[in-house]
Amino acid sequence: MKTTTVFVAVCLILIDQGARSRFLLPHVPDRVFPPVPEYVSNSTLDEEGDEYDPEVSPGLFQGDMALTTEFYNFWRVGIRFDVFPEKLWKGGIVPYVISPLYEPSETVTILKAIRTLSFMTCVRFIPWDGKRKDYLLIWPIKYPKGCWSFVGRFGGAQIVSLQPPDKRGPNCLGTEGRALHELMHALGVFHEQSRWDRDKFVKIHYENVIPQYKSNFDKESLENTTYSFEYDYDSIMHYGRHFFSKKKGKPTITPKQPGVKNIGQRDALSKGDCLKLNDLYGCLKNPKTRRKYYNICNFLGV
């Protein structure tokens, strides 16, 4: 079984690399400067409060999201495509290119994330054909390092930065979880704890938050919410207990509901993640496909 899995993975890589080799990729600089609100700076704290975390280290909006200042004023838990139709990947089709700089095992991890989203939703990731104007360019950017993405369709060759393993650890590619998280941002999904109703479910300990990052825990108003699924502690888009903490052991966010021990994870799509993405892209509107995707989300979501 293991041999078969490795063989299939290698075949996928060869096919993907073959597709990419036919086209000239745009130049990707080592340093990029995604537009972000002026106050945002850098952080090197992880969920434990004292170590490097590639998701919160880039210093972008809420750690890992690149936004224009104009768009920052209208951010959503899930982008309202009726307000920002240009942010929608048209027809749910997302062309992509994976950097040739990744090792084969790292490419396999990224492909697993892509295959997961393509199977669990009606969104379709397709290898870039060298012609489409808008596509994802999945690349190990050197600065800002870490796991980060623009939110929704930004236009042109759109970077999703996934830092490969190094001496510090697995970074963005230990499993497909962090790749899934950033690809969800690229599709237009924000963090779960930003929901308008989050105060019923979690407590934000502002006294433990690094002062310049308190705005990362802002929430949205009811009229800006784009889906009506229940609050999801298990979401791959939810912060962990110690995100942006001043000190190790000091939680910044804790659950209010009894019996809830864990919040946030970077392993797989939850049922809620699966449903919200299908909802944003209209996958649940068609009676013929609604039951299919509800069943997939219920059975395969964590």
Image (cartoon, rainbow, N blue to C red):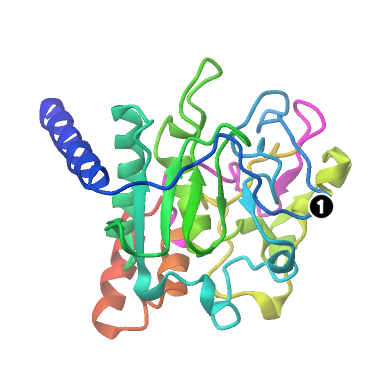
Q: Is residue 300 above or below residue 165?
A: below
Across and down, in percent, residue 233 comes to 57, 53
Q: Is residue 144 above or below residue 72?
A: above
Looking at the rendered image, the quarter that the N terminus falls into is top left
Q: How many marks?
A: 1
Q: Is the magenta stretch mostly helix, strand or loop?
A: loop
Q: In this view, does 143 lie above or below 97?
A: above
Across and down, in percent, residue 103 comes to 34, 27
Q: Which residue is drawn at 57% across and 55% down?
A: 150
Residue 147 position by quadrant: top right
Foreground: 115 or 194?
Answer: 115
Across and down, in percent, residue 222 comes to 70, 77
Q: Is residue 210 left or right of residue 12?
A: right
Residue bearing the label numbered 1: 38
The amino acid pointed to by label 1 is Glu
Q: Is residue 4 left or right of residue 16?
A: left
Assess whether residue 112 is covered by the magenta stretch.
Answer: no
Q: Residue at x 80, y 28 (%)?
A: 247
Foreground: 10 or 216?
Answer: 10
Residue 78 position by quadrant: bottom right
Foreground: 271 or 209?
Answer: 209
Foreground: 265 or 103?
Answer: 103
Q: Which residue is drawn at 13% across and 31% down?
A: 7
